[in-house]
Image: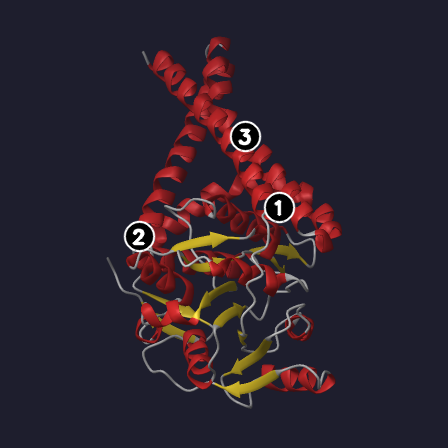
Amino acid sequence: MSYYFLLFVGMLATLTSLYTLRLGRDYERRTQRVLSRPKTGFSPTTCLIMACKGDEPGLEKNIAAMLHQEYEDYFSVIVTDDTKDPAYSVAESVIARYPNSKAMLITSTNHLNASGKVSALLTALEKNKSEVYAFLDSDSFAPPNWLGELVDPLSDPSIGATTGYRWYFPTQNRFWSHVQSAWNSFGTNLLFDDKYNFPWGGAMAARADILDKIKITEVWSTAVSDDLSLNAALREHGFRIFFLPQCMVASMSNITFPNFIKWATNQTALVRAYYRRLWNYALAVFAFFNIIFALGVTSLLAGFLLNPTWFIPAFLLLLPSTTSVLRSKARSDLFKHVMPAMQSQFELKSRMDRIASLIVPWIMSYCILKSSRIQEIEWRGHTYKLATS
């Protein structure tokens, strides 16, 4: 009976694998449609905000890229905790080198119930008025056309926010940096899905009138996560989130295993606190994947120890793992095309990422289970309590 049960489950796993391959092809087609969509010409005055803390790798380059966007009517606002923060002097020196750029360097006003980053964003909103606000993470490099691409679709009043996403590139051949890259890239699978997508805070934009309508200053006044709380507010008011693959940004990674686990668990805990539907979805998907894999390994062992016929369900049950590697490669190839400036970086890391993609479901499952018990997180030297649902 167990043999036929595993054979049946293996057939279901095979169908699931074929379906995920189809989803991958659909994703590529949607990406091409967005890349080729005609521009609306919408280019209102835009305030581009970057919250900075510490002199992290690439900060100088990322600020310089922020100041050199191919967008006529925009100004940049860089926010640090205080003038003693190392990021302040870095930003000050970059701005001084480009005196023709419209840039402002300010320090954050303390909003006691918000996280440090959210407090910085609130400070920028309070001190500057604009038609559109765009947000860029300090560890992210944006290509010159990034801002224009991000703002253009906001002419559609049904769109609450446009978003890009991050792709991690290891600065050294450190294995856990590859795992972080593979872990993070899984999120791109959801960004065309209106049911589960979200604006990612490191590369997003929204119109000022919509932010006013959803009362973003109130929403952020008690928020730990800028993007997930924004997502909840936009969905509550019926607005869509529009993903733009061409607005992907590059971040460098040189992370160790302990720091990666802490980072991944914190990210998952924030999703549980602010976007429980997505957390539940991830729990179901990765639990299914890992159970199927475990049954496949069991069948494989039975094939060696008992009867070669067990290799049949083993093959079917292990097929999703092979499919996962293929999708990882296809995803990497796709974004190598979308991010032409980073092609050499993609080629350097491609093989190691295939291996890392096999580990990601287990890391995801661990983070999901651990985050179910987390009531607070530590982030950049501060501890924040999370709302539980």
Q: Measured from the top left, where is residue 102 in percent x and y?
A: 63, 82
Q: Measured from the top left, where is residue 228 in percent x and y?
A: 38, 61
Q: Which residue is mark 2?
A: 276
What amino acid is labelled 3 in the image?
Thr
Upstream in sequence: badge 2 or badge 3: 2
Q: Measured from the top left, where is residue 100 in percent x and y?
A: 70, 84
Relative to 95, 320 lies left or right: left
Q: Which residue occupies 38% across, 47% down?
A: 196
Circle 2: element type: helix
Asked if the residue at tag 3 contacts the one at tag 2, i.e. Cβ–Cβ closer than 8 Å, the answer is: no
Q: Which residue occupies 62% across, 62% down?
A: 146
Determine which of the numbered discs, if any, sits on residue 104 in the image.
none
What amino acid is labelled 2 in the image?
Arg
Quadrant showing the N terminus: top left
Q: Decide: is 39 above or below 80.
A: above
Q: Nearer the viewer, residue 142 or 59?
A: 142
Determine which of the numbered discs, if any, sits on residue 323 in the image.
3
Q: Which residue is mark 1?
A: 36
Q: Measured from the top left, where is residue 9 in percent x and y?
A: 38, 20
Circle 1: element type: helix
Could you give the CA–CA distance between mark 1 and mark 2, rounded to whole angstroms? 34 Å
Relative to 356, 192 lies left or right: left
What amino acid is labelled 1 in the image?
Ser
Q: Which residue occupies 74% across, 84% down?
A: 97
- Whether residue 298 appears in this view of the structure is no
Could you give the CA–CA distance between mark 2 and mark 3, rounded to whole angstroms? 27 Å
Upstream in sequence: badge 1 or badge 2: 1
